[in-house]
Amino acid sequence: MNELRFLEIINKTLDSSSFLGDDCAYLDDFDIFVTQDTLVEDVHFSLYTISPYLLGRKTVSVNLSDLAAALSIPKFILVSLSLPKNTKNFFVSELYRGINDVCREYGVKVVGGDITGSDKVVISICAIGKKTSLFLSSRSKAKKDDYILVTGQFGNSSSGFYALSNFLQAPESLINSHLNPRPRINEALKLASLIDNDIAVMDCSDGLIDALYKISLASMHNLKIDINSVPVSDNLKDFCSFNSLDYKNFVKWGGEDYELLICVPEQTFLKLDKNIFTLIGRVQNKDNHPSVIIKDNTTSEKITKDVFEKNSFNHF
């Protein structure tokens, strides 16, 4: 089973698939963005490593991250909850306390949802955001010579997950990055206030290279980055050094950092705060078989379709 193949089938089967392709759909009739993400027990989280409170926070945050990539202001969420029959009242109370705290921080209201029975905990959230700019962001909007930027650091969340899964000691910052991610809403709104054309933006929920490759595929351009320009924490490097791990694998393929990957023209890049947005590469020429080039000192790695499908996260 392969997620990309399923998406191809869905696109071909629907009468209209014009709203599909990005993590958020823009509904121009209402001037809103809509997204939905689902977290499944033992696929996306383990109740042995995350508390109900942090699970509630994370479930909302990952949806708000998609709205951040759409450069929109989050306004409402609907929560669908599937629970085993032995679920305790405490679990639901703590889960919704986490949901409520994140919603309060970002001015979001819970406006509905659904509760059903299930063998495992499944939480699905539909999030709605308000358009903030005259211009739109989409994976397909990368253009030749665009500057490729990111927010924040990479590899922290996946290394935190690795530590939890393998019962390893790790800095608290790595663990927290995995259990309690922060959606880049404020950074997205700063970006939205400065753009004067449509741009490519995507959150890196499934990894940095995943986002790079999907933008290259949607825009039909090659993207080239310098992996050593990607912000990385000392805690990640120390953790990997101590455990004989390659920190760059976490940076490239790890996922769940929920940072933004952005492609903007020079005139926008010059206006951005370089303390918030880090330059890691440039968009190259248009190509019918687009790829991602990862420069690492004197070597380069080409991410083609085969390489991507072998290394990227597969939900199945």
Image (cartoon, rainbow, N blue to C red):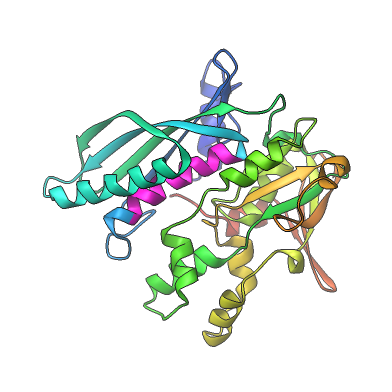
Q: Is residue 270 above or below residue 302?
A: above
Q: Is residue 114 above or below residue 175?
A: above
In the displayed structure image, the side of residue 217 where residue 13 appears, left or right: left
Q: What residue is drawn where x is 55% and y is 52%?
A: 258
Q: Nearer the viewer, residue 294 or 150?
A: 150
x and y percentages locating residue 305 in the rendered image: 68, 50
Q: Is residue 147 above or below residue 25?
A: below
Q: Nearer the viewer, residue 4 or 179?
A: 179
x and y percentages locating residue 131 in the rendered image: 60, 26
Q: What residue is drawn where x is 43% and y is 74%?
A: 163
Residue 152 location, quadrant: bottom right
Q: What residue is drawn where x is 58% and y is 40%?
A: 68
Q: Nearer the viewer, residue 170 or 144?
A: 170
x and y percentages locating residue 45 in the rendered image: 36, 56
In the displayed structure image, the side of residue 85 where residue 277 appears, left or right: right
Q: Nearer the viewer, residue 311 or 123?
A: 123
* Residue 42 visible within the image: no
> Does residue 134 show up magenta in the picture?
no
Q: Is residue 144 above or below residue 88?
A: above
* Residue 96 visible within the image: yes
Question: Range of the magenta residues?
Answer: 54-68
Residue 37 location, quadrant: top left
Q: Main secondary structure of the magenta part?
A: helix
Q: What residue is drawn where x is 16% and y is 52%?
A: 90
In the displayed structure image, the side of residue 126 where residue 26 appears, left or right: right
